[in-house]
């Protein structure tokens, strides 16, 4: 399987994230992508390619113009606030609550950070824009590759994307790679596209982008938002609205879910996708469902991921795999490679 590797990923390397009142080292580290690359090379799994560069306009298929402007200028605005900021990452510390106005873009950069984000766990680094844009290029290139008739493609990138929405970042995500892949497939002629999201966390960004659309079906298996991030979206009764009514399917599971139960949810998700009669498939591939993940609570073992890939192959749709979460650095290479190997085997 052709793999589009984001060679720019290491430009984004956050120092700390805010977690329950203290700064902790970032979980989305450059080693994540490197370990996957090393393991795929070791197994001779797929050929590595660099994506064609994209124009910023390509991002506007999914994101708000003022959000893209914000991201592009964020670092220079941050440093302009205080020259000493060049040595620390930008973390939001103020947010508009529901009754506040969000139509006016503030001049104050700290206020802009809050307007375009939803948590303080996602440091906006000097290289975030460059790395995120490189990832978007990978997702778009992978989608185009599948559309030329390939059996599948993989966007090997970080930072991840599924928490990023039309005009907000958070959950370590800035640009929604999976949504860009889905939109690229639509623009290339696919009538209906499914996004299967198997990251441990609900993809609130992807869901919200397609919630009112029938042409992109979002199906997600994730930890119950009553107990787990991103908390405010991902419940089972969110089924889409307007023309998108019925095209959003959330399958939340409790913390501590073992593979047997998770696999039944995957079968259900694939059944929904089969019934939706889509012509293309994007897989938001997070492996933070792993039993050893430091921030998650499902119990999948490394060998289970071979079966995950195999089950996805039964959908008979050439998938665009896009890397999302997975923070057990020592296992991420094996876990991701197992999904891809299970798929091609
Ligand atoms: N101390 C993705 O997997 N909060 N994002 C975790 C841990 C945010 C995860 C707190 C988790 C976001 C793409
Ligand atoms: Zn996740």
Image: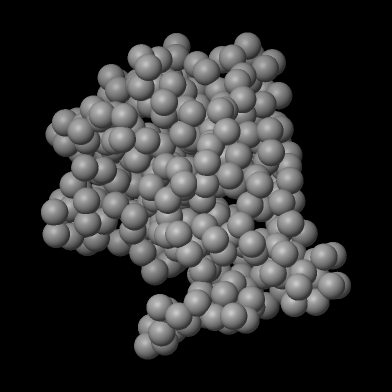
Residue located 75% across and 77% down the image = 81
> What residue is at 37 percent from the left and 35 percent from the top?
184
Residue 153 located left or right of residue 281: right
Number of labels in the image equals 0
Residue 217 visible here: yes
Colouring convention used in this rendered image of the protein = one colour
Q: Which of the 4 quarters of the picture holds residue 106?
A: bottom right
Q: Percent x, y for residue 13?
A: 74, 51
Q: Is residue 28 visible?
A: no
Residue in front for this viewpoint, 2 or 276: 2
Q: Residue furthest bottom?
A: 99
Q: Position of residue 162 (x, y in %)?
A: 46, 50
Quadrant of the rendering where the C terminus is positioned: top left
In which quarter of the view is residue 235 placed?
bottom left
Relative horizontal placement of residue 170, taking residue 259 as reference (left or right): right
Compared to residue 255, the image places residue 188 above or below, namely: above
Seen from the viewer's position, the closer of residues 22 and 226 is 22
Q: Would residue 215 be found to the left or right of residue 187 on screen?
A: left
| In-front residue for pair 63/239 | 63
Question: Residue 176 vs residue 210: left or right?
Answer: right
Quick one: 137 or 253, which is closer to the camera? 137
Residue drawn at point x = 34 percent, y = 47 percent: 220
The location of residue 111, given as percent across then percent down, is 58, 80
Q: Position of residue 272 (x, y in %)?
A: 20, 38
């Amino acid at each position: 399987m052709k793999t589009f590797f984001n060679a720019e990923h290491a430009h984004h390397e956050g120092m700390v994230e805010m977690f329950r009142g203290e700064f902790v080292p970032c979980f989305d580290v450059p080693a994540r992508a490197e370990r996957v690359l090393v393991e795929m090379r070791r197994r001779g799994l797929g050929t590595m390619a660099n994506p064609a560069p994209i124009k910023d306009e390509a991002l506007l298929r999914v994101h708000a113009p003022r959000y893209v402007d914000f991201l592009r200028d964020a670092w220079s605005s941050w440093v302009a606030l205080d020259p000493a900021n060049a040595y620390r990452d930008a973390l939001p510390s103020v947010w508009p609550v529901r009754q506040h106005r969000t139509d006016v873009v503030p001049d104050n950069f700290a206020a802009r950070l809050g307007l375009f984000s939803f948590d303080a766990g996602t440091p906006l680094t000097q290289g975030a824009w460059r790395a995120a844009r490189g990832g978007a290029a990978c997702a778009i290139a992978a989608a185009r590759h599948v559309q030329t008739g390939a059996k599948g493609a993989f966007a090997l990138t970080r930072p991840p994307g599924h928490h990023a929405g039309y005009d907000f970042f958070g959950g370590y995500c800035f640009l929604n790679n999976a949504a860009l892949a889905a939109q690229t497939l639509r623009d290339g002629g696919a009538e209906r596209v499914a996004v299967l999201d198997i990251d441990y966390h609900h993809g609130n960004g992807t869901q919200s982008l397609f919630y009112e659309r029938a042409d992109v079906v979002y199906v997600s298996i994730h930890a119950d938002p009553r107990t787990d991030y991103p908390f405010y979206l991902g419940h089972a009764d969110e089924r889409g609205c307007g023309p998108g009514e019925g095209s959003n399917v959330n399958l939340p599971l409790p913390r501590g879910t073992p593979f047997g139960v998770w696999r039944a949810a995957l079968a259900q998700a694939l059944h929904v996708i089969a019934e939706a009669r889509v012509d293309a498939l994007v897989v938001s591939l997070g492996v933070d469902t792993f039993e050893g993940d430091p921030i998650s609570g499902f119990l999948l073992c490394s060998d289970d991921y071979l079966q995950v890939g195999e089950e996805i192959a039964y959908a008979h749709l050439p998938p665009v795999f896009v890397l999302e979460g997975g923070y057990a650095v020592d296992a991420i290479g094996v876990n991701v490679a197992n999904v891809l190997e299970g798929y091609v085997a």
